[in-house]
Image: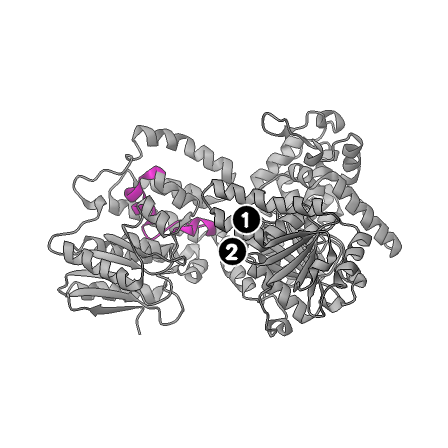
């Protein structure tokens, strides 16, 4: 059975029905490419009034075959290029054979699917929430290689096309119509085909051409030499460099493809696109990003990291949740849950504090209302699901409770006992602690098997990750319910085992400490922040320390010291400790208190505090490569230690968690993939160099040495 079925109706219209026999979605794999070739050869011998391209799947077309793209190697580039050109030649025949071709879009048309639709003369979409249109290839380190970089600028103009190409923007049906991506909307599948037939019957009597194949075609908004475009394109590379810091080659390749392609004929433009596409596909950055953001992420969401007993648990959606603590974190979690249809009881010590927490949701919704992203009825519906209270009795009926109070063990124990007195036996109790071991916190619980860690990241309504931490007595049922709930509210869960700081806080602390430590060594603060940006970190270690607050860092250090002393263990020290003490003594604990490493003037942007020059006189100039790699290596090495100590359960959890939770550069594919792509042997040698120069914390762990000796990489079996 082929991926494309050819049927002819009573009006002599050919229906090309895309129906991948080996998967639930249509993809641009070898079977599809061969089927398209065979279909074109058959159509060349047929007489027909026009062609309707449609799908037998729930989606129109899912996109490229990422398995084959991921497997592509540089020594196969020539053959890969030829296959790309062959596919595009067949799409080109469809749009130039003269009879009208209609794309009947019944579901998502993303990536290669949208490129197929672009090769049609008329695009009609079903008006349904499941229909999304766009070219997300850039998010996987690729560019649209099926004609998207050539047709989109010719359809919309260079300036209007670039956001779709450079940002991977996806739109719903109404926006697609408004933007000019589609020409018609159908209310149901019957009307979809009726409109498609009508277009063919109305246009089948004359030769139909794409706008860009018309003799008098002029690119909307002008070509690359048009004064307005030329002005934009002069500054565009600098704007891209500012955004990507040269770490992401795909946006640069997309811009080059669009500009170069706009100055030549269509066929030459498609060859230019294929060359850039093949170069990216065979490159390491795309493989890092595809491996993590596609394969690992899909496996993770499917529960690959859960133990077998948790996978077998039949979970139920949470309908009512209690949140203890209406501070910034608790308020944001309440807003997330209510926005996803969950009833929320938001409790604090006073009604005033609880109502202030609920106001966070109202403020967030007001912003969405002003931007046209919600309406008044929807806003009031979300707010009605949040019950602000100062009474623990209101927690009755909750199926899950999340504790989000301060990082104080005694306080957490108190609110746990108070809440549990109101709860049934089959209620999950989760602590949002970022550092305190779950097994210890569970001692305050009457049902430690129902107790689990659920670590959200600030701001919780924007950050995609939730770190789930299993305590010593956490049951498989509790883990399964927590995992399902995180997916229910649209977040990405990773699962880790219990430890002080778990995975994310422990590794994040290494990043901030390394940056602050370099400051104490006499490294210029601007060099530290710039090196972080050049390495691909979204925020530098000094800036993010201001956001977290040095006061909190000091409290965590004191709590850790107290716990370790009680356990009779050695107290660790770090070069950053003295610098944090100095900043606190200077009254600069961070942004919330008015200033830290940065100043935050009311009028104007933040900037590094001039007083740093006096407090930490720059006396040491390190190679930029060393500053960058100290930040990258310390996080990668600590992540590996977490994996070695069985805190991390899988490589995929490590990679997803490091990017989504603590800002490890996306181009690397994650902290452990960074080690793989660097090369195990080369990473060991470089780590040893850094250890000799800057401290034993860079010494490669035993697991890494073993991998080097056996010539293996870090991977999930």
Seen at 28% across and 34% down, the residue is 222
Q: Using the rendered view, name the quadrant where residue 672 is placed.
A: bottom right
Chain-order first, disc 1 or disc 2: 2
Q: Position of residue 702 (x, y in %)?
A: 71, 59
Name above or below for residue 628 compared with residue 636.
above
Cα distance between the residues tagged 1 and 2:
9 Å
Seen at 19% across and 58% down, the residue is 198
- Span of residues in magenta: 134-159
- 486 in the magenta segment: no
Name above or below for residue 178 compared with residue 443.
above
Q: Position of residue 481 (x, y in %)?
A: 63, 66
**Which secondary structure lies at badge 2?**
helix
Seen at 48% across and 36% down, the residue is 241
Q: Position of residue 202 (x, y in %)?
A: 15, 55
Visible in this render: residue 464? no
- 154 in the magenta segment: yes
List the residue tagged with mark 1: 666
| Residue placed most toward the observer, 138 or 83 | 138
Horizontal side, residue 108 vs residue 316: left or right: left
Q: What coloring was used for the rendering?
A: one colour
- Figure quadrant of the N terminus: bottom left
Contact (Cβ within 8 Å) of mark 1 with mark 2: yes
Visible in this render: residue 353? yes
Look at the magenta stretch and give its main secondary structure. Answer: helix
Q: Which mark is residue 310?
A: none
Horizontal side, residue 36 vs residue 637: left or right: left
Q: Which mark is residue 293?
A: 2
- Figure quadrant of the C terminus: bottom right
Q: Position of residue 519 (x, y in %)?
A: 71, 34
Q: Using the rendered view, name the quadrant where residue 128 is placed.
A: bottom left
| Residue placed most toward the observer, 166 or 172 | 172
Q: Using the rendered view, name the quadrant where residue 703 is placed.
A: bottom right
């Amino acid at each position: 059975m082929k991926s494309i079925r050819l049927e002819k109706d009573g009006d002599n219209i050919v229906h090309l029905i895309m129906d991948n026999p080996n998967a639930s979605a249509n993809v641009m794999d070898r079977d599809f490419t061969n089927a398209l070739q065979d279909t074109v050869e058959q159509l060349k011998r047929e007489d027909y009034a026009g062609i309707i391209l449609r799908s037998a799947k729930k989606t129109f077309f899912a996109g490229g075959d990422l398995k084959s793209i991921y497997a592509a190697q540089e020594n196969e580039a020539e053959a890969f290029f030829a296959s790309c050109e062959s596919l595009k030649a067949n799409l080109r025949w469809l749009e130039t054979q003269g009879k009208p071709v209609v794309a009947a879009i019944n579901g998502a048309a993303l990536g290669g699917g949208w490129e197929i639709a672009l090769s049609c003369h008329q695009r009609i979409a079903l008006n349904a929430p499941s229909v999304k249109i766009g070219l997300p290839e850039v998010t996987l380190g690729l560019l649209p290689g099926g004609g998207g970089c050539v047709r989109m600028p010719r359809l919309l103009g260079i300036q209007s096309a670039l956001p779709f190409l450079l940002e991977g923007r996806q739109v719903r049906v109404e926006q697609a119509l408004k933007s000019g991506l589609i020409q018609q909307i159908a209310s149901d599948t019957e009307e979809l085909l009726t409109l498609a037939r009508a277009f063919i019957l109305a246009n089948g009597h004359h030769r139909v051409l794409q706008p860009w194949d018309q003799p008098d075609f002029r690119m909307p908004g002008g070509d690359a030499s048009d004064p307005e475009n030329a002005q934009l394109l002069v500054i565009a590379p600098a704007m891209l460099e500012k955004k990507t810091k040269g770490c992401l080659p795909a946006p640069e390749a997309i811009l080059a493809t669009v500009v170069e392609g706009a100055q030549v004929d269509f066929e030459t433009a498609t060859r230019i696109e294929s060359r850039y596409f093949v170069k990216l596909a065979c490159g390491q950055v795309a493989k890092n990003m595809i491996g993590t953001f596609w394969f690992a992420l899909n496996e993770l969401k499917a529960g690959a990291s859960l133990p077998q007993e948790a996978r077998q648990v039949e979970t139920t959606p949470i309908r009512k949740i209690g949140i203890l603590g209406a501070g910034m974190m608790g308020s944001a979690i309440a807003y997330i849950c209510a926005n996803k249809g969950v009833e929320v009881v938001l409790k604090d010590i006073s009604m005033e504090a609880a109502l202030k927490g609920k106001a966070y949701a109202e403020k967030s919704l007001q912003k969405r209302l002003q931007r046209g992203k919600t309406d008044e009825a929807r806003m009031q519906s979300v707010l009605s699901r949040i019950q602000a209270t100062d009474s623990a009795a209101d927690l009755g009926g909750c199926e899950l409770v999340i504790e989000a109070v301060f990082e104080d063990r005694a306080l957490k124990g108190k609110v746990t006992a108070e809440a549990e007195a109101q709860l049934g036996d089959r209620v999950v109790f989760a602590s949002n602690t970022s550092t305190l071991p779950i097994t210890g916190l569970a001692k305050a619980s009457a049902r430690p098997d129902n107790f689990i860690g659920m670590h959200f990241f600030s701001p919780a309504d924007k950050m995609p990750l939730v770190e789930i931490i299993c305590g010593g007595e956490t049951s498989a049922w509790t883990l399964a319910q927590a995992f399902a709930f995180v997916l229910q509210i649209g977040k990405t869960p990773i699962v880790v085992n219990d430890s002080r700081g778990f995975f994310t806080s422990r590794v994040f602390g290494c990043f901030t400490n390394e940056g602050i430590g370099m400051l104490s060594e006499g490294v210029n603060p601007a060099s530290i922040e710039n090196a972080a940006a050049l390495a691909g970190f979204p925020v530098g270690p000094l800036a993010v320390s201001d956001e977290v607050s040095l006061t909190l860092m000091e409290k965590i250090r004191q709590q850790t010291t107290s716990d370790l002393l009680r356990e009779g263990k050695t107290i660790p020290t770090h070069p950053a400790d003295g610098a944090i003490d100095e900043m606190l003594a200077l009254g600069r604990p961070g942004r919330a208190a008015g200033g830290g490493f940065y100043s935050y003037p009311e009028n104007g942007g933040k900037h590094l505090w001039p007083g740093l020059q006096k407090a930490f006189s720059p006396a040491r100039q390190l190679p930029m490569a060393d500053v960058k790699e100290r930040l990258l290596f310390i996080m990668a090495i600590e992540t590996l230690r977490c994996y070695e100590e069985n805190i991390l359960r899988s490589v995929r959890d490590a990679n997803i968690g490091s990017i989504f939770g603590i800002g490890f550069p996306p181009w690397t594919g994650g902290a452990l993939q960074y080690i793989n792509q660097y090369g195990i042997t080369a990473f060991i040698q470089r780590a040893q160099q850094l250890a000799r120069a800057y401290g034993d914390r860079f010494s490669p762990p035993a697991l890494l040495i073993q991998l080097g000796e056996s010539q293996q990489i870090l991977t999930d079996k």
